[in-house]
Every structure is written in C-alpha cells, then in structure tokens.
Image (cartoon, rainbow, N blue to C red):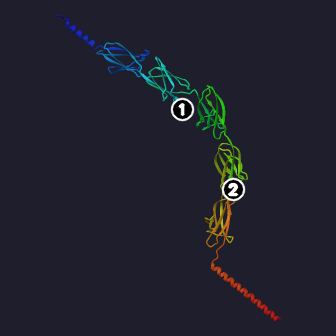
C-alpha cells in the first residue's frame, strides 16, 4: 500500500482550490482616436456595473475574479460610447474613443438693423475638415463637426467687412452669433449748433435725393460707396438748411452737421378785456424783461430764434398774463388779453344825507349782490375799469339808481347812494287840505285887511 497517495491527493486538491480562487487584473488605457491623446475621467462599466474612471494618464486597473468573460463599456461626454467583450484571462486593453459629430451653427446679425444677414459665405475649417455654406434667410449656416476640436470660421459678403473667428466645440454642439458690419456703412448725426442736443426728424438729402430722416438720437444710417464725393443737404423746420460736399474715404464713417435755429420777427399785442390796447405793459420772455408796449399796446421783437418760449405780461391794475408759445413762423403775432384787477367796493345806502339805511338790497347790473348791514354798508369784490349799473331798493324808500366806474388799479372803493323815504297817501291828503285851508285863510286875511284899509280912508275924507 502506497502511503504517499493520500498525501498527493490532498496536495492536488489544495492546489486546485488555490487556482480556483485566484484574481486577475485588467489594465485599461483610454485614448482619443483622433490624436492618440490620453483621456481622463472616462466612466468604465463591467457587465453594466460601474467600476471607476480613468486618471490623468487615461489609465485604470480593474481586478476581477477571472471566472468568466465580461463586457467592458467606456463612455465620456463628447465621445461615442465604446464597448467590447473582455476574456477572463486578458490582462490589458486599449480603448480608442471616437469623437461625436455635433452641429456648429453660425448666425450673422447686422448691428444697424439687428436683422439677420442672408447670403453670406461661411467657411469652417479644422483638422481634416473644410466646409463652406451660405447663410439662409435667418442668417444661419449649419456644419457637422467633431466635439472637442477647435475650428476656424471665415465669413465674407459683398458690402461687409470680412470676419474671422475661432470656435472651440468643447463637449457638445454650439451656436455662435456674430455682428456682421457693413463696409459701406456711413452715419449722419445732426445736432443743434447752440445746445449740442440731437435734432430728430431732420431730412437728409444725398446728391439731391431723399435719404431719410434722423431718429430720436439725431442719427440716420446710410450705405455709401467709398472714395467718392457726395453732396449732403440737411433740412429741419425752424432751422437754417445745412449744405456741404464731402469725399467719403475708407476711413470715414460719420458726418456731423450742426444746425442753427432760424430767427423771426415777433410782435406781442396786449389788450384788456374790452379789447382796448394796454400801454406800458411790461413784456418778459423766459423770465427776462424785454420792454414795454407802446400806445397801441404793441411790443416788437426784431429777431427771435424759433423755439418754445414762456411769454409773460404785467401791467398795473391788471392780472398777470403768462403763456407758453411756439415760435415757428416769420411775422408771428402773440396776443395777450389782460384781465382787469379786482377791488373791494363798499356800497353805502344813506337817507337824508346822513342816516344809514340797513337791510337795503344792492343790485349790480340787475343782479342782487346782497343787503346792507346796520351801518348801511355792503362790501363785495368787483373788477375795476368797468361801468356798473347800481341800484338800491328798500321797503319804505324810493329806489335809487346810478352808474359807477371802479377806477383801474384801485384796491378799495366806496360808492354812496342816497335814498328817500316814501310818504303815506293819507299824510299827503291831510297836508294838501292843510295847505288849501292855509291858503284860504291867507286870502281871507288879505281881503279883510284890504277892506279895513278902504273904510279907514273914507273916514279920513
């Protein structure tokens, strides 16, 4: 009997157990299929289970049980997914990732109009790539390029400056927008010669042909060929016209005409409420005193620039007048109508010249204005320089009427109106009878005296 056989069997079983439990290591290296450069941060999966990411050198070591083959998957943004079956005894694998194809969209915009530029030729070039497209009605051109690469973009179109740019695609598709400037762009900016402010609405003519009007900033954009001489004319209401000839070279982009305001003679006529001229009225324009009106109520300014002015008129006895006027035409007349000032007018009702009458109704131009107080007075405000029909009525008194003019410029004024008591009818009859009796007695007395005188004369004879 061989005593060593059991020992051999045990050794063989132990060896088989050791081999069955042995682990295997797979060295993985990931590179870019375009340039063979190492790719870091690539996600790795074994049979769908995440196992890790590549390091800075694009490598990763994966230890597994080596019991069976498995599928290795590698993925990173911007690259096509890579997948392969790995044998259980494989010790290394080289993963070459292909860059994804993405869309590069180039869009062109005109900065003057902020509208797309159609018909421009766009060329995109890079490593093993060179394509050209024409922008569509949206100002766009699309290119299918690889991610992670840098491309040159060249743009051209007649009447525009050539444009060159570079685009880094990064990990995905890109859409880039560019201002595309015209090479024939020329601007006219119109300003006020006195203030420097923009003049909007100015009409611009080029070689006597209408070119357009300036905007709120006083600007009009034009498109003119270079190295030519043009005749410019600018017109605007209330301004003197501007004219010049200008050679537009390749480096000229702006013309800045300065417009001076037109000047006009202006007459200011001042009247009162009854359309009578007011002499000596003080005229002010924008707060500055200019002079006074003549006997015809007029003040003439020989020259004033077109524009908006605050015109003020003052005269003693009148309310101040002020109005904003737009001076736009030659020989314009500004008419100021001054309202009369007011005075506190006291009406006094008197009887017998020295007795105040209370409760009397005062009527002004037929309208009741109020009743007198205990002192026979009524005070009301009235405009000056106007003739009023004044009447006073009171029970027991005869009505009294008068016309009164309140002096221009007066602040207070007093009007006294005398009224007489009404005598009763029976008193009048008694008085009349008394007068008749008195007259009869007087006649009788005179006759008697005359008779006595005659009798005495006879006796003396």
Residue at the location (81% across, 95% down)? Answer: 459
The label on residue 201 is none
Q: In which quarter of the image is the C terminus?
A: bottom right
Residue at the location (67% across, 81% down)? Answer: 432
The x, y position of residue 59, in whole percent, is 39, 16
1 and 2 marks in contact (CB < 8 Å): no
Q: Earlier in the sequence, mark 1 or mark 2?
A: 1
Q: Which of 25 and 380 is in front in this view?
A: 380
Side of 104 relative to 193 (left or right): left
Label 1 environment density (alpha carbons within 10 Å; few <14, some 14–19, many ≥20): few
Q: Can residue 167 be seen in this view?
A: yes
Taking 278 as reference, is 448 above or below it? below
The x, y position of residue 2, in whole percent, is 18, 4
Taking 312 as reference, is 425 above or below it? below
Q: Quadrant of the N terminus?
A: top left
Side of 405 relative to 166 (left or right): right
The x, y position of residue 383, in whole percent, is 65, 59
Taking 436 as reference, is 399 above or below it? above
Secondary structure of the residue carrying numbered label 1: loop
- As drawn, the residue found furthest toward the right would be 461
Q: Nearer the viewer, residue 421 or 267?
A: 267
Side of 24 relative to 327 (left or right): left
The x, y position of residue 107, in whole percent, is 49, 27
Q: Quadrant of residue 195?
A: top right
Q: Which of 308 and 110 is in front in this view?
A: 110
Q: In which quarter of the image is residue 380?
A: bottom right
Side of 259 relative to 104 (left or right): right
Q: Can residue 308 be seen in this view?
A: no
Label 2 environment density (alpha carbons within 10 Å; few <14, some 14–19, many ≥20): few
The residue that disc 1 covers is: 113
Taking 303 as reference, is 450 above or below it? below
The residue that disc 2 covers is: 276
């Amino acid at each position: 009997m061989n005593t060593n056989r059991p020992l051999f069997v045990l050794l063989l079983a132990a060896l088989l157990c050791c081999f069955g439990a042995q682990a295997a290591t797979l060295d993985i290296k990931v590179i870019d299929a375009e340039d063979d450069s190492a790719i870091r941060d690539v996600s790795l999966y074994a049979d769908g289970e995440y196992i890790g990411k590549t390091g800075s050198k694009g490598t990763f070591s994966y230890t597994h049980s080596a019991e069976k083959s498995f599928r290795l998957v590698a993925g990173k943004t911007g690259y096509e997914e890579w997948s392969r079956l790995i044998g259980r005894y494989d010790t290394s694998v080289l993963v070459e990732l292909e860059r994804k194809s993405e869309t590069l969209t180039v869009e062109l915009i005109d900065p003057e109009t902020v509208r797309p530029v159609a018909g421009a030729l766009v060329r995109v070039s890079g490593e093993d790539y060179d394509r050209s497209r024409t922008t569509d009605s949206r100002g766009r051109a699309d290119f299918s390029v690889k991610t992670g690469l840098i491309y040159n973009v060249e743009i051209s179109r007649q009447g525009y400056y050539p444009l060159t740019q570079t685009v880094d695609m990064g990990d995905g598709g890109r859409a880039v927008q560019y201002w595309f400037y015209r090479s024939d762009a020329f601007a006219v900016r119109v300003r006020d010669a006195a203030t420097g402010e923009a003049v909007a609405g100015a009409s611009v003519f080029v070689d006597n042909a209408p070119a357009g009007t300036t905007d709120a900033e006083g600007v009009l954009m034009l498109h003119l060929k270079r190295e030519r001489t043009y005749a410019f004319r600018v017109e605007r209401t209330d301004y003197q016209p501007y004219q010049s000839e200008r050679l537009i070279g390749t480096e000229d982009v702006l013309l800045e005409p300065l417009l001076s305001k037109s000047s006009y003679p202006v007459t200011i006529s001042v009247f009162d409420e009854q359309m009578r001229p007011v002499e000596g009225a003080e005229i002010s324009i924008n707060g500055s005193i200019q002079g006074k009106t003549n006997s015809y109520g007029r003040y003439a300014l020989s020259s004033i620039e077109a524009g908006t002015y605050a015109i003020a008129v003052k005269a003693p006895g009148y309310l101040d007048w002020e109005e904003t006027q737009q001076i736009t035409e030659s020989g314009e007349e500004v008419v100021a109508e001054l309202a009369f000032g007011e005075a506190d007018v006291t009406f006094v009702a008197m009887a017998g010249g020295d007795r105040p009458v209370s409760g009397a109704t005062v009527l002004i131009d037929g309208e009741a204005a109020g009743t007198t107080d205990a002192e026979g007075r009524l005070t009301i405000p009235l405009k000056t320089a106007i003739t009023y029909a004044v009447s006073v009525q009171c029970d027991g008194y005869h009505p009294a009427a008068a016309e009164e003019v309140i002096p221009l410029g007066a602040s207070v004024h007093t009007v006294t109106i005398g009224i007489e008591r009404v005598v009763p009818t029976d008193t009048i009859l008694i008085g009349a009878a008394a007068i008749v009796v008195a007259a009869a007695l007087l006649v009788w007395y005179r006759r008697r005296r005359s008779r006595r005188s005659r009798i005495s004369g006879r006796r003396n004879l």
